[in-house]
Amino acid sequence: MKHFFKLLLLLSSSLFAIENHPYIDGVAVIDVGVFKEKPKIFYKAKEAKVILKKNHYFAIIGIGLNEKAGKKHIVAVSKNKKKDFYFQVKSKSYKKEYIKLKTNKRVTLSKVDLERFHKEKAKAKKVLGSFNKTLSTDLDFKVPVSGRTSSPFGKRRYFNNKPKAPHSGIDIAAKRGTPIVAAQSGYVMIREEFFFNGNTIYLDHGEGIITLYCHMSDFAVNKGDFINKGDVIGYIGTTGRSTGPHLHFGVVLNANAVDPKIFIKDFL
Ligand SMILES: [Zn+2]
């Protein structure tokens, strides 16, 4: 009997595939039909990730946080211009957090820090927009560290009623030094200390999917390494702008930050 359940578990995990979540900051999964070989699919003139499931190909599109609900988007099949597909962005309500500050004075960065921050921002933008065709992984990710979700994805933050950037990942609180594992197999494309994000690793999983791990105390891998899903890449810390030991875990799909929970079916 035990074996039967084990088999069921194995079957369900191998059949796992992400569902269509076409809301703002979500992922649209579009059935583009049957092709002899993997088709090239384009979204906003950029190539998109495509997966095969039961003879059908599916385009996997990350939706940006600045998109408007109700807007129709085109997913284009390059070989046959007449065979375009559409999806409509759905609205979703996110948790809001209003933070009152005594003054409107911001944290002022020194000229050197500001220059550093702008350089890092430009570097991150360039890397996150890349599309590595040499690697293709499935979308069944592993929890990088177990712990309490201290801040959910997409939380809209307001300082003195002024909207700030929404939370682009998920925060998982854990003890300092707890190992952090790779959510999926991939290459270490960034391994460095950033001004706000502290010790940071970007893993490239190919076809525009990148995972981010921030505020680590230390690294366990080097830039360029190929990491298998579940391997230790670093340790929980509180480097950068952080108020306590936690992991900021992010998933980027076609340059848009999307909800990591979509990729992890057993998220705690
Ligand atoms: Zn965070």
Image: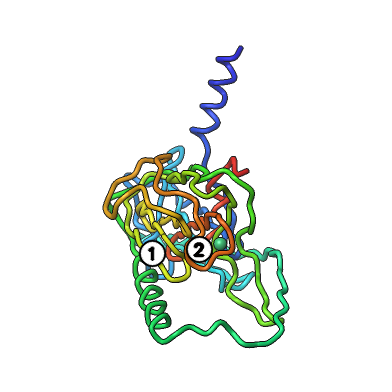
- Displayed-image quarter of ligand 1: bottom right
Of marks 1 and 2, the one in the foreground: 1
Could you tell me how far apart the alpha carbons at marks 1 and 2 are, in whole angstroms?
20 Å
Q: Is residue 188 left or right of residue 44?
A: left
Mark 1 near mark 2, Cβ–Cβ under 8 Å? no
Q: Which residue is mark 2?
A: 257
* Picture mark count: 2
How many other residues sit within 10 Å of disc 1, few (<14), some (14-19) or many (≥20)? some
Between 231 and 96, the one lying in front of the other is 231
Three-letter amino acid code of the residue under disc 2: Ala
Q: Position of residue 265 (x, y in %)?
A: 58, 42
Residue 256, image x and y in percent? 48, 65
Q: Which residue is mark 1?
A: 193
The residue closer to the viewer here, 48 or 178, is 178
Q: Residue at x 29, y 46 (%)?
A: 226
Q: Please provide percent x and percent y for residue 130.
A: 34, 64
Please give the name of the residue rendered at 49% of the width and 55% of the height, measured from the top-left corner.
Answer: 237
Q: Look at the numbered disc 1 and give the secondary structure of its residue.
A: strand
Placement of the N terminus among the 4 image quadrants: top right
Dividing the picture into quadrants, the one containing residue 47 is: bottom left
